[in-house]
Image (cartoon, helix red, strand yellow):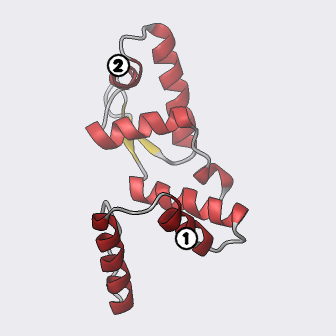
Amino acid sequence: MKRNEVDVTEAELALLTALWDHGPATIRRLAERVYGEGGPSAYATVQKLLERLEQKRCVARDRRESVHVFAPAVDRGELIGRRLRAVADSLCGGSFTPLLTQLVEGDGLSPAERDELRSLIDRLDRGKTRRPGN
């Protein structure tokens, strides 16, 4: 996995979140969603962030109209997986076990979250996987 496929900044993540939550949008619409009124500086910031996200293959640009529309090219679950893999690689020698242990024991899970985790493990044991968000 290439570094640029994983390395999404918090500002870039804010744009991706707006696209995931509200669907495809123009630069102006994204600037309004993320920065409020903002003006020209917010527009320029969003434009630059979208260029970076496009280079990282995280957004796709529709150039058919004079005003370009941007859409997510990566889903939330895929980005979560990429980021977790990077953390596992850098902190845990590639193993997910320490990450999972910390998540489960660290803050604790609600009864509903424990049930969901049990259900996921049962599906994995049966060979039927389904990713959240898909």
Q: Is residue 40 left or right of residue 26?
A: right
> x and y percent of residue 40 in the render?
47, 8
Q: Residue at x 64, y 65 (%)?
A: 88
Q: Is residue 19 left or right of residue 1?
A: left
Q: Is 102 placed left or right of 76 in the picture?
A: right
Q: Which residue is mark 2?
A: 32
In this picture, is 106 found above or below 23?
Answer: below
Q: Circle 2 — which element?
A: helix
Residue 122 in view here:
yes
Q: Nearer the viewer, residue 74 or 101?
A: 101
Per the image, label 1 sits on a secondary structure element best described as helix
Three-letter residue code for mark 2: Glu
The label shown at residue 16 is: none
- Picture quadrant where residue 131 is located: bottom left
The quarter of the image holding the N terminus is: bottom right
Q: Is residue 63 above or below residue 109?
A: above
Q: Residue at x 38, y 84 (%)?
A: 124
Q: Residue at x 45, y 59 (%)?
A: 78
- Observer-side mark, 1 or 2, equals 1
- Mark sitting on residue 101: 1
Within 10 angstroms of label 1, few (less than 14), some, or many (20 or more) residues?
Answer: few
Position of residue 48 measured from the top left corner of the image (x, y, whole percent): 55, 26
Going by the image, does 93 lie left or right of 133? right
Residue 75 shows in this picture:
no
Residue 29 percent coordinates (x, y) = 32, 23
Local crowd at mark 2 within 10 Å, few (<14), some, or many (≥20)?
A: some
- Relative image position of residue 6 (x, y in whole percent): 59, 52
Q: Where, by quadrant of the figure, is residue 130 drawn?
A: bottom left
Q: CA distance from mark 1 to mark 2?
A: 40 Å
Return the residue found at the far top.
Answer: 39
Q: Earlier in the sequence, mark 1 or mark 2?
A: 2
